[in-house]
């Protein structure tokens, strides 16, 4: 075998270029993943479809402060407090419901039996509800957050 660099012999191949580092995190521009991490494992599992609908209903600039999973109009749903709005969605097959209401002046009542909580919202002449929340402590926090924002206007 002729020595390297001799006529008729190809030089050894160059070392491959280093591969640039890639960030493998999932984008979460609205903070929904962080907020959902506070939910119980059962709520996250049972609310997967509603949370997916919610993720699509969020608009540019929306930042999720808190999220709940339960039932909205009798269907798996999610409720979220944003800076100045309440967003309610459900995972109704083929036609999910998405309702956005301003928090200013909103009233909220909560009921809990120790295992499940329900919230009733009033804004002007409009009333709506969210039932079947397993994370009762988070439901209390959710209602208090709405009261604070509604009072601040």
Image: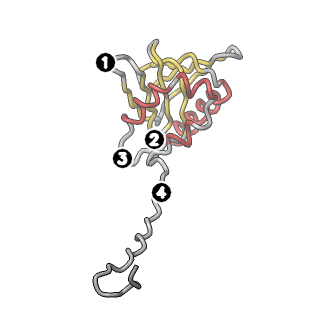
Of the image marks 2 and 1, the number of the one nearer the N terminus: 2
Please name whichever residue, 118 or 52, is drawn nearer the observer in this view of the structure.
Answer: 52
Local packing at callout 3 (Cα closer than 10 Å; few below 14, some 14-19, many 20+) is: few
Q: Secondary structure at mark 3?
A: loop
Q: Quadrant of the N terminus?
A: bottom left
Tell me the number on the disc at residue 84: 2
**Disc 2 versus disc 3: distance between alpha carbons?**
14 Å
Please name whichever residue, 91 or 59, is drawn nearer the observer in this view of the structure.
Answer: 91
Tell me the number on the disc at residue 94: 1
Q: Are marks 4 and 3 in contact (CB under 8 Å)?
A: no
Q: Which residue is mark 4?
A: 23
Q: Secondary structure at mark 4?
A: loop
Tell me the number on the disc at residue 83: none
Q: Secondary structure at mark 1?
A: loop
Local packing at callout 2 (Cα closer than 10 Å; few below 14, some 14-19, many 20+) is: some
Residue at the extreme left of the image, as rendered: 8
Q: Say which quarter of the image contains residue 11.
A: bottom left
- Foreground mark, 2 or 4? 4
**Disc 4 versus disc 3: distance between alpha carbons?**
23 Å
Local packing at callout 4 (Cα closer than 10 Å; few below 14, some 14-19, many 20+) is: few
Image coordinates of residue 67 in percent, x first then y, are 54, 33
Q: Say which quarter of the image contains residue 92.
A: top left
């Amino acid at each position: 075998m002729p020595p390297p660099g001799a006529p008729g012999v190809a030089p050894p191949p160059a070392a491959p270029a280093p591969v640039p580092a890639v960030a493998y995190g999932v984008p979460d521009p609205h903070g929904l993943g962080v907020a959902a991490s506070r939910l119980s494992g059962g709520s996250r599992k049972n609310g997967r479809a509603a949370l997916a609908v919610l993720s699509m209903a969020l608009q540019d600039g929306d930042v999720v402060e808190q999220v709940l999973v339960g039932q909205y109009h009798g269907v798996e749903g999610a409720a979220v407090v944003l800076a100045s709005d309440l967003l309610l969605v459900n995972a109704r097959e083929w036609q999910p419901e998405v309702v956005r209401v301003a928090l200013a002046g909103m009233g909220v009542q909560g009921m809990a039996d120790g295992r499940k909580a329900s919230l009733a919202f009033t804004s002007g002449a409009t009333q709506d509800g969210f039932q079947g929340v397993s994370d009762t402590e988070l439901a209390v926090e959710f209602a208090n957050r709405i009261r604070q924002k509604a009072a601040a206007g």
